[in-house]
Amino acid sequence: MYRKTIFAAAFTLLAAPAFGFQCPMDMAAIDEALAANPQISAEQMAEVKALRAEGESLHASGDHDGSVAALAKAKAILGL
């Protein structure tokens, strides 16, 4: 039992930073899609840019779950 607890704790500590690296990849994908001049409305474009900025801000503050959620909304609008 003790061994399983140690393993679970070690995995959590080692895996958690990996999730933070998804945010920059998502932001880059959004930036690339925006540069390709997507066929979306001006309203959708404004929403994507706001969500992208929110995701970057949340990532910088350490809220990677919130960042991933905001960036996922932006990606969905862009069809990514």
Image (cartoon, rainbow, N blue to C red):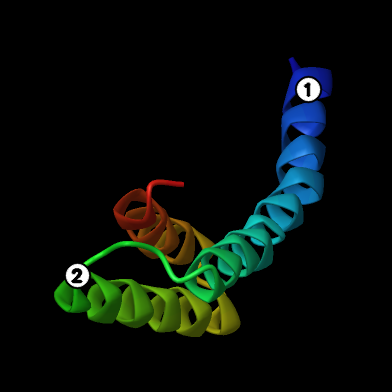
On screen, residue 58 versus residue 70, left or right, reads right
The residue at the point 33 percent across, 71 percent down is 48
Secondary element at image label 2: loop
Residue 51 vertical position relative to residue 26 in the rendered view, above or below: below
Q: Position of residue 32 (x, y in %)?
A: 60, 67
In front of the other: 25 or 44? 44
In front of the other: 21 or 9? 21
The residue at the point 73 percent across, 30 percent down is 8
Which residue has dot 1 on it?
A: 2
Picture quadrant of residue 51: bottom left
First in sequence: mark 1 vs mark 2: 1
Which residue has dot 2 on it?
A: 41
Q: Position of residue 28 (x, y in %)?
A: 64, 68
Residue 57 vertical position relative to residue 52 in the rendered view, above or below: below
What's the amino acid at mark 1?
Answer: Tyr
Question: Spatial distance from mark 1 to mark 2, Cα to Cα?
Answer: 56 Å
Dots 1, 2 in contact, CB < 8 A: no
What's the amino acid at mark 2?
Answer: Ser
Disc marking residue 27: none
The residue at the point 74 percent across, 14 percent down is 1
The residue at the point 84 percent across, 21 percent down is 3
On screen, residue 39 versus residue 14, left or right, reads left
Q: Residues within 10 Å of mark 2 (few under 14, many from 20)?
A: few
Picture quadrant of residue 38: bottom left
